[in-house]
Image (cartoon, helix red, strand yellow):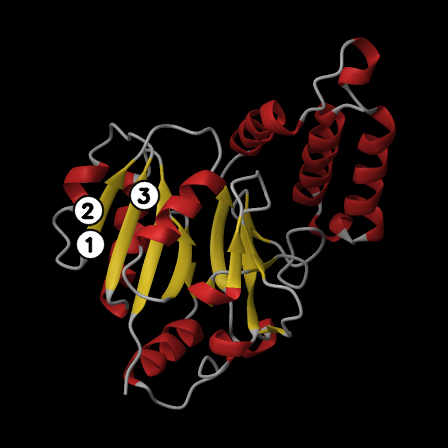
Amino acid sequence: MGNKVSLLVNCLNEVNNLKNNIIPLAHHFDEVVIVDMQSNDGTAELIKKLDNSRFIEIEKMGYVEPARKIGINSCKYDYVFILDADEILSEKIILEINRFRKGEKTEFIGLVDIKGLMIPRYNSMFSQDITWGKFAPENDKQLRFFKKGTVEISSKIHLGIKFKCNMEVVTLPFSSGYYIYHFHSATALEFIGRVVRYAEYENTKQPGKNSFNVTNAIKAFVKEYILSGGYKHGKTGFALAYILSLREFLKGK
């Protein structure tokens, strides 16, 4: 007996990413649920052409977690796979999903019912694949495929989905070809824009000298560039360390 799987994507003005990344994957799922924050780029018209899709428009929220919660609750099927519009799946993941939907033997059978499943994410930063530091696959593990009853859903930033207590967690091996490929940021300006946007929600809202944090900024740079091997990516590694330090700087004390 097969299993039905919903693909959930949250987006805002991502029509090109949807065309390039999500539409080609749609036939590997039983439904595609798009939760959109009032895009004005033709996203609605594009998605409504898909036979197995549902388009849900919500108000702009500033960050994705509240929209994730709405999306998960809106999915028709118990098994949910989440992608961002700027992500694609490795061939190995696609193969396993197709087997899972057919009820065939697969790495997913059993795991998503009784265990927590984490999938490595392989990031492209400034057109360079990242294998060291915070954004390396071994450090960027994502909860993206699960059965609804096995997770808890929060609307807080960066805390959206987590496994319920006492669940054994299994991480699929990146070395075996299991990963989500993420076109993270094409330019430094794009990444900095994200950091500044998130800072509006992460900042402690303290005045004066407490509105920034020099100590944590320095620590973040040293950790990313030196201790975690970011320097091995050359200029890109330096840029990532600098931007991550900026994020800590903007959080405040």
**Residue found farthest to the top:** 208
Residue where numbered disc 2 is placed: 47
Q: Earlier in the sequence, mark 3 or mark 2?
A: 3
Q: Earlier in the sequence, mark 1 or mark 2?
A: 2
Residue where numbered disc 1 is placed: 53
* Quarter that holds the C terminus: top right
Q: CA distance from mark 1 to mark 2?
A: 7 Å
| In this rendering, position of residue 224 left or right of residue 63 | right
Looking at the picture, does residue 168 appear above or below residue 11? below
Determine contact: label 1, label 2, CB under 8 Å: yes
Q: Position of residue 131 (x, y in %)?
A: 65, 59
Q: Position of residue 209 (x, y in %)?
A: 83, 12
Q: Position of residue 148 (x, y in %)?
A: 43, 63
Residue where numbered disc 3 is placed: 35
Determine contact: label 3, label 2, CB under 8 Å: no
Q: How many residues crowd mark 1 within 10 Å: few (<14), some (14–19), many (20+)? A: some
Identity, as a three-letter code, of the amino acid under mark 1 = Ser
Q: CA distance from mark 1 to mark 3?
A: 11 Å
